[in-house]
Image: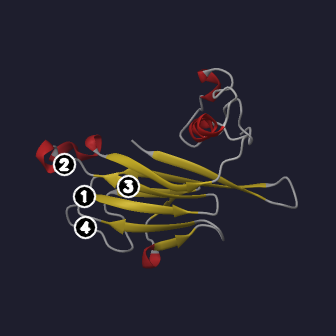
Amino acid sequence: SAVALKTCKSETDSDKLDWTSFSMFPRAPDPDDEGSKEVLKFATVEVDGEPITTFHGGKLAVTDTVTLSIKNRSSYSRVSFSSPEMTADFDAVMPPAEWDVKHDVERYMHINLKIQSIVLSDKCHGLMGVSNRAATDDREVIEGEVEDYAVSSLLATDFKYSVTRT
């Protein structure tokens, strides 16, 4: 399993969109690595397709408005994502010890997502846009067909209603 997030900051004086992508992949811990305040124990993180190996002081300023911070616990590693549009925690979680899957840990790991705050426009599509409209709108929740939301890869934005058309 993996999770990917693409955020956009619209420039006020132009139509330029400033995109940042974030991906988190669970990984089995190295038995010799206890993790630290600067290195994730149970996950690998990429920003704009580049692996991030060290978070100096436990934090990383991705842009002037997007920051990541990390925490390692005994059974999970957390990456906290913060931007003006969204704050969320992504936890790479180890399988419980009683499952006895020591030799296949990555297969049984998962990611928990907790969104503390999010700003969505009425033009937002995908899982979060549909959820927002279902909670706040009387109009049809899903526009088009399910197939219209298919993308070609984890970070692709090439679905029918994409504002990026990439």
For label 2, the residue is 96
First reached walking from the N terminus: tag 2 or tag 4: 4
Which labelled disc corresponds to residue 91? Answer: 3
Q: Is residue 100 visible?
A: no
The Cα atoms of the two marked residues, 3 and 2, are separated by 14 Å
Q: Quadrant of the C terminus?
A: top right
In the image, 33: left or right of 120? left
User: Mark 2: which amino acid?
Assistant: Pro
Question: Do tag 2 and tag 1 residues touch (Cβ < 8 Å)?
Answer: yes
| 59 over 130 or under it: above or below | below
User: Mark 3: which amino acid?
Assistant: Asp
Residue drawn at point x = 17 percent, y = 45 percent: 103
Tag 4, which secondary structure? loop
The Cα atoms of the two marked residues, 4 and 1, are separated by 14 Å
Tag 3, which secondary structure? strand
Mark 4 Cα shell of 10 Å, populated few (<14), some (14-19), many (≥20): few
For label 1, the residue is 75
User: Mark 4: which amino acid?
Assistant: Asp
| 62 over 21 or under it: above or below | below
| 104 over 35 or under it: above or below | above
Mark 2 Cα shell of 10 Å, populated few (<14), some (14-19), many (≥20): few
Q: Nearer the viewer, mark 4 or mark 1?
A: 1
For label 4, the residue is 33
Residue drawn at point x = 55 percent, y = 49 percent: 5
